[in-house]
Image (cartoon, rainbow, N blue to C red):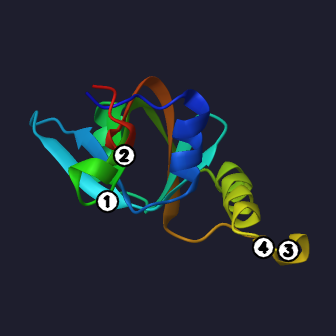
Amino acid sequence: MPRQLTRQEAHDFLDSKPGWIALTTVGPDGFPHTVPTGYFRLGDDILLGVRNNTLKIRNIRYNPQVSLMIESGSTRQDIKGVMIQGNATVIAEPDEFLHYAREAAKLRGVPDDQLPTEPRPGAAYIKVTPHKIRSWDYSQDAG
């Protein structure tokens, strides 16, 4: 059995950005829709930078319950991952979008005098507030 990550280990893993995070939404037809996207973490929330009015955005407006999954490793001995089930909010209002764009830039090390001053046209963020987090780490197999 794999070992579960502690909350801090899960945050550290997410912050290490081992790859794209997979976002799964469910549309009105009842089918899941999964896409890889870039992300960053603020506190417990995960923010995904996306284009506005895409299928994932429309699905979230229909049903805000989503799933995120990210995993690293290529063999059973080094697989590690996190799966988050949560509620998503679309952030497209210019002032709120700009706030998160500036936070994202700060996390990338952009100097204060070079932070964004206007929102990107046609862009949005999806903010996922976790409800349930599951994790696994096969590198320290518990049994």
Taking 22 as reference, is 122 left or right? right
Q: Provide the residue designation for mark 3.
A: 111
Query: Mark 2 or 4 closer to N-term?
Result: 2
Kind of residue at badge 1: Pro
Q: Nearer the viewer, mark 2 or mark 3?
A: 2
Give the residue type that dot 2 points to.
Lys
Density class for disc 4 (Cα within 10 Å; few <14, some 14-19, many ≥20) is some
Q: Residue furthest front?
A: 143
The answer to whether the residue labelled 3 contacts the one labelled 4, judged by CB atoms less than 8 Å apart, is: yes
Q: Nearer the viewer, residue 27 or 136?
A: 136
Q: State yes or no: discs 3 and 1 in contact (Cβ < 8 Å).
A: no
How dense is the environment of label 3, judged by Cα within 10 Å: few (below 14), some, or many (20 and up)? few
Q: Are marks 1 and 2 in contact (CB under 8 Å)?
A: no
- Quick one: 4 or 67, which is closer to the camera? 4
Write down the residue under mark 4: 110
Residue 72 or residue 121, whichever sits in front: 72
Residue 9 in the image: state x and y as whole percent. 56, 38
- Residue at the (90%, 76%) spot, across then down: 113
Q: Is residue 127 above or below residue 34?
A: above
Q: CA distance from mark 3 to mark 1?
A: 28 Å
Task: Identify the residue position indicated by label 2 in the image.
Answer: 80
Residue drawn 70% across the image and 59% down it:
98
For this orientation, the residue located farthest to the bottom is 114
